Image (tube, rainbow, N blue to C red):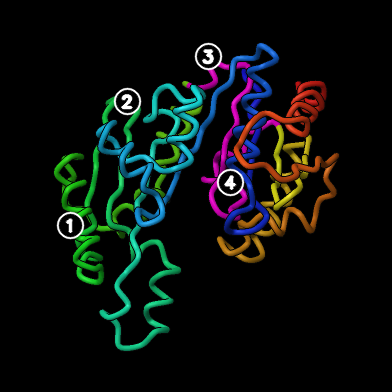
């Protein structure tokens, strides 16, 4: 059975999760380990993701920057299994709003600016793409034209983001994501699971499957070897605050990490000394 390592961010944006995961995965592969990477739910903004837009056209699958990077590095073979849910957002047009605060509010809410999504169903081995037409009116004409081109290329069908949100919190989605993870475990010695933003985990049931956790902040990664303690800390915060408590800062406040590594600065993601050190130490401490 593969060792499952959860990688989550301490801050909502630019914590360094992807680069840490990529560097560690490459370091593990360099040691001769079979490596899997799982990003259950991924979101990206089309405006800031020209490479991902091009990749989506070429692959005929909606794919974001992070998953595309894993794919190009050979760490992801089956995009559907490694990334069952992909969401594309786009920046709204400020001139469509009467007040700037409404514009800013939408910009910070994925559901209000999501324009495309993809859901992979493991049992069917099939992808379904959706276009979220309820958000297109607030986009610029340039963005709408791009989304229309992508809709045609991806054969996307109309679907509300509310419907996608309901699916993502359902037992059906949890079961589907679990099947994808188990498939990755079958061919791997170690599986890295990347969460999103500062969520403790991409879905709640995952915490029952992990062997260790890493919380990444800019410049540093904090490692927790005891998954049971992580689950207890997350459960305590959830019981007190609901889903608002399902954030890494509460685990970070409650638990002392077993060790940490300095990740440093890098121009491009690669396996460097901190990643090799992490792999060496985690491999010896997690059974």
Residue at the bottom extreme of this rendering: 98
Give the mark, 1 or 2, whose residue is nearer the N terminus: 2
Give the Cα separation between the discs numbered 1 and 4: 35 Å
Q: Nearer the viewer, residue 168 or 95?
A: 95
- Distance, label 1 to label 2, CA atoms, is 34 Å
Magenta-highlighted residues: 184-211
CA distance for labels 4 and 3? 22 Å
Residue behind mark 4: 201
Disc 2 element:
loop
N-term-proximal mark, 4 vs 3 = 3
For the residue carrying disc 4, how many other residues have a C-alpha within 10 Å: few (<14), some (14-19), or many (20+)? many
Q: Earlier in the sequence, mark 3 or mark 2?
A: 2
Q: Tag 1's secondary structure?
A: helix
Marks 4 and 2 sit apart, C-alpha to C-alpha, by 23 Å
Q: Are marks 3 and 2 in contact (CB under 8 Å)?
A: no
Identify the residue position indicated by label 2 in the image.
Answer: 123
Q: Earlier in the sequence, mark 3 or mark 1?
A: 1
**Residue occupying the point 70% across, 56% down:** 236
Binning the other alpha carbons within 10 Å of mark 3 as few (below 14), some (14 to 19) or many (20 upward) gives some
């Amino acid at each position: 059975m593969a060792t499952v390592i959860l990688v989550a961010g301490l801050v909502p944006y630019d914590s360094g999760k992807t680069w840490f995961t990529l560097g560690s995965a490459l370091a593990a592969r360099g040691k001769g380990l079979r490596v899997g990477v799982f990003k259950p739910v991924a979101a990206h903004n089309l405006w800031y993701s020209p490479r991902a837009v091009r990749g989506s056209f070429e692959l005929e699958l909606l794919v974001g920057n992070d998953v595309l990077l894993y794919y190009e590095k050979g760490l992801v073979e089956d995009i559907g299994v490694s990334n069952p849910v992909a969401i594309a957002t786009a920046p709204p047009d400020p001139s469509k709003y009467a007040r700037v605060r409404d514009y800013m509010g939408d910009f910070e809410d994925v559901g209000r600016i999501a324009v495309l999504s993809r859901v992979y169903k493991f049992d069917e081995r099939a992808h379904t793409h959706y276009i979220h037409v309820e958000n297109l009116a607030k986009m610029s004409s340039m963005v709408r034209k791009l989304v229309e081109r992508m809709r045609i290329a991806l054969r996307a069908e109309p679907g509300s983001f509310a419907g996608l949100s309901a699916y993502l919190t359902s037992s059906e989605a949890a079961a589907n994501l679990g099947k994808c993870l188990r498939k990755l475990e079958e061919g791997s010695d170690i599986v890295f699971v990347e969460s999103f933003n500062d969520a403790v985990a991409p879905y709640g049931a995952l915490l029952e499957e992990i062997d260790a956790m890493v919380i990444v902040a800019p410049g540093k990664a904090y490692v927790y070897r005891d998954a049971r303690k992580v689950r207890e800390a997350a459960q305590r915060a959830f019981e007190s605050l609901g889903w608002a408590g399902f954030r890494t800062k509460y685990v970070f406040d409650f638990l002392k990490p077993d060790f940490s590594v300095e990740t440093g600065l890098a121009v491009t993601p690669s396996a460097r000394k901190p990643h090799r050190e992490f792999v060496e130490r985690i491999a010896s401490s997690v059974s």
